[in-house]
């Protein structure tokens, strides 16, 4: 059945839609073909494609699932919270999830060949049924399923779904190539600027170590500003050494792409912990995560340069995603990708404010000069979200959210205990001079409010709540050991 043509309320609306459509169509060339041509594998390609497509259409979450002859063989999930793939994989079109969210699901089909489905969750209710969004999602699906068919068409005498079964059984979804001296094992995650892979390095004597390898996305590899920012992150990371900061081992350029090799954290990011389906967070767990993260942050804030003077380092991009909770109970702050040192301003290009609007300080949102107290405001927002499950100033629009951060008072939500509210209220003062002076001082306040869990207690609890992630970590080690034994 032919669909009715789309109608637009204005020329501007039509232009915005057409720009989105062109951007989606370019995505396959810039991401999928790059990953597959460099032999990074289908898992890596799917991971990058899903993430970039979701960001492009402003989705909150998304999933991508490929099916073999009997069952799913490859599933990738992106976004905040836990996305129920089982529930939505067989849905089609826009479906209202609740009053605040709509899921858009399109099939990954080529003719009568059913390869799976792709879906995205967007905020809000769409009075027109979300037809424009659905058109973009269907275009995204067409781009991906065509590339998948190209990837699996190397097989003779098998259908595409049979070939997917074979690849899954052989483990060939995992990358099996190199970037420099690092052998890639699996896709780990993708952000707006870079993709992170699990990789291993073989040192003299055959000693193998797992690392997280971060590479600039192909569409940004020729952007001098992005490359400089990426290398700045690496250089800053090499200066920092603290148990609560991720360790940077190496950085360089290989295969036409810049990379950073860093410590691989066996754990989950704090966003997953906040939204775990196990009820409210134990206060001792929250205290442990926050106190450790703040101590790591304090070390970065106090870091000195070769001249002995303070670098004046400010993270500027703190969020629950940038706090990793390890299965050993150690918390790490990562992603100093948009960090700035002394004498640097928040705006690096005309009109471009660096950082995530949901976690900005007022001075960051208004492009004023910032210092370490800006990061403490962000930490206050993280505590608020951890206790309430809501983002303090979220207006579902970046500009309105920043305006709310700058201008709106924050009311105490029901159910937040006094000892936590005192910390939140001080951290979220509009004027920096009214906040905690240092991250260490804020960490002390957290520990005095609630005694933190011991490291082994935190590690055991998080491991028990995320068994699938523990299994992933175990699989990385097994793959590393298998490859090492094969090359002896």
Image (cartoon, grey):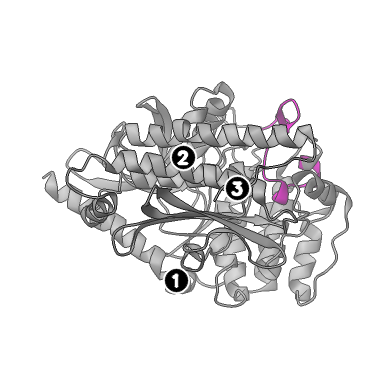
Residue receiving disc 2:
143
Query: Counting residues from the N terminus, which is met first, the one under dot 2 or under dot 3?
Result: 3
Position in image of residue 442 (x %, y %) = 70, 59
The answer to whether 331 is drawn above or below residue 375 in the figure is below
Is any atom of residue 239 visible in this view? yes
Mark linked to residue 3: 3
* Front of the two marks 2 and 3: 3
Q: Is residue 338 left or right of residue 431?
A: left
Report which residue position mark 1 lands on.
Answer: 456
Residue 349: say if magenta. Answer: yes
Q: Secondary structure at mark 1?
A: helix
356 horizontally vs 202: left or right: right
**Of 227 and 105, the residue lying toward us:** 105
- Stretch of the chain drawn in magenta: 340-364
Q: x%, y% of residue 49?
A: 47, 42
Q: Note whether residue 310 is visible.
A: no
């Amino acid at each position: 059945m032919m669909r009715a043509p789309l109608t637009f309320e204005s020329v501007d609306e039509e232009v915005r839609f057409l720009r989105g459509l062109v951007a989606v169509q370019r995505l396959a060339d810039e991401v999928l073909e790059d990953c597959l041509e460099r032999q990074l594998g289908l898992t890596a390609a799917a991971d990058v494609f899903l993430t970039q497509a979701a960001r492009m259409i402003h989705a909150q979450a998304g999933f991508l699932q490929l099916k073999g002859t009997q069952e799913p063989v490859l599933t990738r999930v992106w976004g905040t919270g836990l996305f129920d793939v089982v529930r939505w994989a067989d849905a089609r079109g826009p479906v209202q999830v609740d009053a605040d969210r709509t899921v858009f699901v399109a099939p990954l089909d080529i003719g009568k060949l059913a390869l799976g489905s792709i879906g995205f969750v967007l905020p809000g209710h769409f009075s027109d049924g979300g037809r424009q969004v659905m058109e973009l999602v269907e275009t995204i699906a067409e781009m991906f399923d065509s590339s998948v068919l190209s990837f699996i068409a190397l097989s003779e005498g098998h259908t595409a779904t049979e070939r997917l079964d074979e690849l899954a059984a052989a483990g060939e979804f995992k990358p099996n190539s190199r970037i420099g001296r690092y052998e890639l094992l699996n896709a780990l995650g993708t952000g707006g600027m870079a993709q992170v892979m699990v990789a291993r390095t073989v040192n003299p004597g055959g000693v193998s170590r797992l690392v997280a390898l971060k590479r600039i996305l192909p569409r940004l590899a020729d952007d001098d500003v992005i490359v400089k920012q990426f290398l700045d992150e690496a250089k800053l990371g090499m200066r920092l050494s603290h148990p609560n900061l991720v360790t940077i081992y190496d950085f360089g350029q290989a295969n036409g792409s810049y990379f950073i090799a860093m410590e691989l954290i066996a754990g989950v990011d704090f966003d997953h912990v906040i939204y775990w389906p196990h009820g409210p967070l134990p206060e001792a767990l929250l205290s442990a995560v926050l106190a450790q993260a703040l101590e790591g942050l304090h070390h970065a804030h106090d870091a000195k340069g070769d001249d002995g003077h303070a670098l004046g380092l400010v993270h500027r991009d703190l969020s629950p995603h940038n706090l990793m909770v390890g299965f050993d109970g150690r918390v790490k702050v990562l992603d100093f990708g948009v960090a700035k040192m002394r004498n640097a301003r928040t705006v690096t290009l005309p009109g471009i404010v660096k950082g995530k609007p949901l976690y900005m300080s007022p001075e960051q949102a208004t492009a004023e000069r910032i210092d370490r107290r800006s990061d403490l405001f962000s930490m206050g927002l993280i505590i608020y979200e951890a206790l309430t499950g809501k983002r303090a100033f979220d207006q579902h629009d970046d500009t309105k959210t920043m305006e709310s951060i700058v201008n709106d008072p924050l009311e105490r939500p029901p159910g937040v205990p006094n000892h936590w509210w005192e910390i939140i209220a001080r951290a979220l003062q509009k004027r920096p001079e009214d906040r905690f002076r240092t991250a260490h001082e804020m960490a002390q306040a957290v520990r005095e409010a609630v005694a933190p869990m011991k490291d082994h207690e935190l590690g055991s609890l998080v491991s028990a709540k995320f068994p699938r992630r523990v299994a992933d970590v175990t699989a990385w080690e097994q793959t590393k050991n298998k490859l090492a034994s094969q090359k002896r």
